[in-house]
Image (cartoon, rainbow, N blue to C red):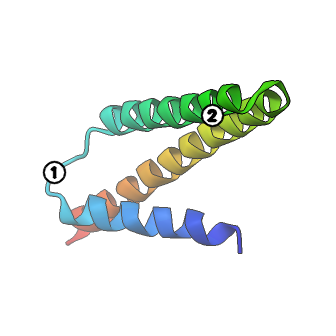
Amino acid sequence: MAYVLEILIIIIGIIYGYTKPGKEDRTALLKNGVIIGIILAAIMVVLGLIGGRGILLLGSLVGAAVFIEVIILTILFIVGTYIGDMLERKR
């Protein structure tokens, strides 16, 4: 069940790579993914700070986990764009 999101992200990446003409700027996609991951992780840490000392550790751990998951999803999306570009070239 946990892999459904990852498979969906790859499919969306394939569709994005296939429907958008030309090669995608994968460096910009990766940079945007890192920026989104940092923002979401910072939000989780701030929520942990607001919650108090006991919640701070939990907020920090969740922030780190969210950052890692966003990076993984971004890489899977970029893999999907590679596949979509290959399909577009074969067409």
Three-letter code, disc 1: Gly
Identity of the residue furthest to the right in this view: 54
Task: Please say if 75 is above or below 54.
Answer: below
Query: Compared with residue 50, is residue 69 higher up or lower down, i.e. above or below?
Result: below
Image spot of residue 78 (x, y percent): 42, 48
Q: Nearer the viewer, mark 1 or mark 2?
A: 2
Q: Which residue is mark 1?
A: 22
Percent coordinates x, y for residue 25 in the rendering: 26, 38
Q: Quadrant of the C terminus?
A: bottom left
**Foreground residue, 66 or 15?**
66
At x 54%, y 50%, the residue is: 73
Question: Between 16 and 38, which is closer to the camera in this rendering?
Answer: 38
- Residue at 37% across, 35% down: 32
Please count the marks in the image.
2
**Nearer to the camera, 86 or 76:** 76
Residue under the image location 55 percent in, 33 percent down: 43
Q: Left or right: where does residue 60 sit relative to residue 79?
A: right
Q: Earlier in the sequence, mark 1 or mark 2?
A: 1
Query: Residue 14 falls in which quadrant of the image?
Result: bottom left
Residue 47, disc: 2
- Quarter placement of the N terminus: bottom right
Left or right: 28 with respect to 56? left
Amino acid on which disc 2 is placed? Leu
33 to 52, vertically: above or below: below
Q: Are dots 1 and 2 in contact, CB under 8 Å?
A: no
- Report helix, strand or loop for mark 1: loop
